Amino acid sequence: MNYFVDWLKVQLSNPQIVFLTLFLLATALIISYAGTILAPVIAGIVIAYVLEGLVGRFTDLGLPRPVAVGFVYIGFIVFVIGTLLVVFPVLYSQLTQMVQQIPALLYRGQLELVQLPEHYPELFSVEQVRELITAIRTQLTDYGQQLVSISLSGAASIITWMIYLILLPILIFFFVKDKKKILNYLIRFLPKDRELTAQIWNNVDIQVANYVRGKFWEILIVWGVTLIAFSFLGLNYAMLLSFLVGISVLIPYIGAAVITIPVVLFAWAQWGWSSELIILTVTYLVIQALDGNLLVPLLFSEAVNLHPVAIIVAVLLFGGLWGLWGVFFAIPLATLVNAIIVAWPTPPQPEGS
């Protein structure tokens, strides 16, 4: 107990530690209670991080920063407009067709389940299969009710997204254009004695920038490669399923495992138990293996080497606290925690140790 009291006195006597603690608590409270309101700002900062890397490349080639910002921003707007006009209509169309196929898929799955006691009587009984089918129907009913509630609030969501589409480009432009001005303005509110905060920030800033830019390119590369593979093999809903595979990289380990279910399920619905299903499954697993063992090390060469257990715990913890944003920033937040632990002053050792 005396050791803890001594440690607490040392921490409270250090103004840098007190400021850092209060700053982290204030940031966590703001995100927890105002995260939804500030979502466009957070999204703008994330995208600005991605674009800043491209701006830096152009400035390294000798272009003035205003010119580099203009080129990168125009390219970003063209990319977004092209995605909205070309890719999203295809995604929406395939999503509609996929939803319409679900009843037939469920009926076919029910027939397969009913046959299990006949083929594997030592493993499955008729009563077990009935209970499983009932549980699936109940769960699907709950999902249906959730979809209805979401559709009822669709008008408000559309308005919100329209506001985001207007605000985001403006925020992104000024975040990139006036990066130094914004940072200098915020620094004015920091205490002069801030070596500890600066040390942590410099480390985390590099890691977050590397992570955000790396994830952006990882999504595009995995999406593109998967789309080519699925289209070549003739899989239905190739655009939508490959898009989901690309987005799944946002959730390390867990995302790849979860997205495997719809990929294999709709491949089975199309081809049944056939060689085409095996080829597609093997191809998909090869893409996942190349992503984890080749692409990720190349894109995240400067990232902190976090243990897989730490990453999974971070995803579960921050995802539970802040939803999708918490999942996306799980690794940067885990990096922040690690940087704080490393930079934190060494506590006093008890006498006689």
Image (tube, helix red, strand yellow):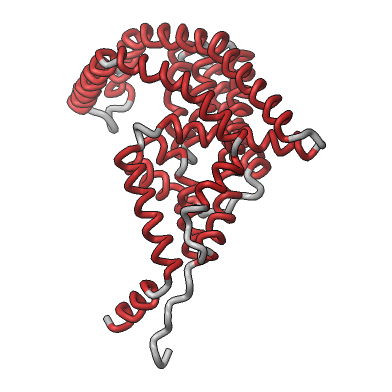
Q: Residue at x 28, y 32 (%)?
A: 122
| Residue 29 visible | yes
Q: Residue at x 35, y 40 (%)?
A: 322
Task: State the count of labels.
Answer: 0
Give the camera-side residue of 2 and 258. 2
In the rendered image, which quarter contains the N terminus? bottom left
Give the residue furthest to the right.
62
Q: Residue at x 23, y 17 (%)?
A: 149
Where residue 352 appears, x then y in whole percent?
41, 93
| Residue 129 visible | no
Give the camera-side residue of 53 and 91. 53
Where residue 73 appears, x then y in whole percent?
64, 25
Give the residue furthest to the bottom.
352
Q: Quadrant of residue 294?
A: top right
Give the camera-side residue of 301 and 131. 301
Q: Is residue 190 above or below residue 236?
A: below
Q: Residue at x 71, y 25 (%)?
A: 71
In the rendered image, which quarter contains the C terminus? bottom left
Q: With 149 as the anchor, is 298 left or right in this view?
A: right
Where residue 22 appears, x then y in whole percent?
37, 58
Where residue 130 appears, x then y in whole percent?
20, 22
